[in-house]
Image (cartoon, rainbow, N blue to C red):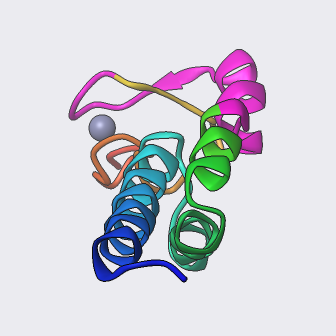
Amino acid sequence: MMDMSSWMFIFVMSIGCGIACMIIAYNKGYRGNQIFGWLAAGLFFSIFGLIAVILTSHGSEASHAVRSSAACRHCGAPLPVEAARCINCGANTSPAS
Ligand SMILES: [Zn+2]
């Protein structure tokens, strides 16, 4: 039987990995429910969820960067032409009329 400190260690590890997964997923361009999906992955799979989020690449991040032909007027980040908002700073990127 495991003692209390072992359970505490697993608990803290799970929370830590969940939060780390969330932050990494956010930096990779995941938003909304996807962020909570990665949080759950970190909570349930601990270090394995963390490895998964590190190894994964968000679809829009890589593919759109190549096709991007616009840059954010606010922060200069490359953007897909169809983006209504900056993926980096969230600024409205529709052309000024
Ligand atoms: Zn921006």
Quarter of the image holding residue 95? top left
Image position of 2 with respect to 78: above or below: below
* Residue located 58% across and 79% down the image: 33
Instruction: Give the image location of residue 40, x and y in percent.
Output: 58, 76
User: Residue at the left extreme?
Assistant: 74
Front residue of 92 and 95: 92
Identify the magenta region: 55-76
Q: Is residue 3 left or right of residue 34?
A: left
* Residue located 38% across and 69% down the image: 6
The total of numbered circles placed on residues is 0
Give ligand 1's quarter of the image. Answer: top left
Quarter occupied by the N terminus = bottom right
Image position of 70 with respect to 56: above or below: above
Instruction: Give the image location of residue 41, x and y in percent.
Output: 64, 67
* Residue located 45% across and 44% down the image: 24
Image position of 72 with respect to 28: above or below: above
Instruction: Give the image location of residue 83, x and y in percent.
Output: 57, 49
Q: Is residue 26 left or right of residue 9?
A: right
Q: Is residue 74 magenta?
A: yes
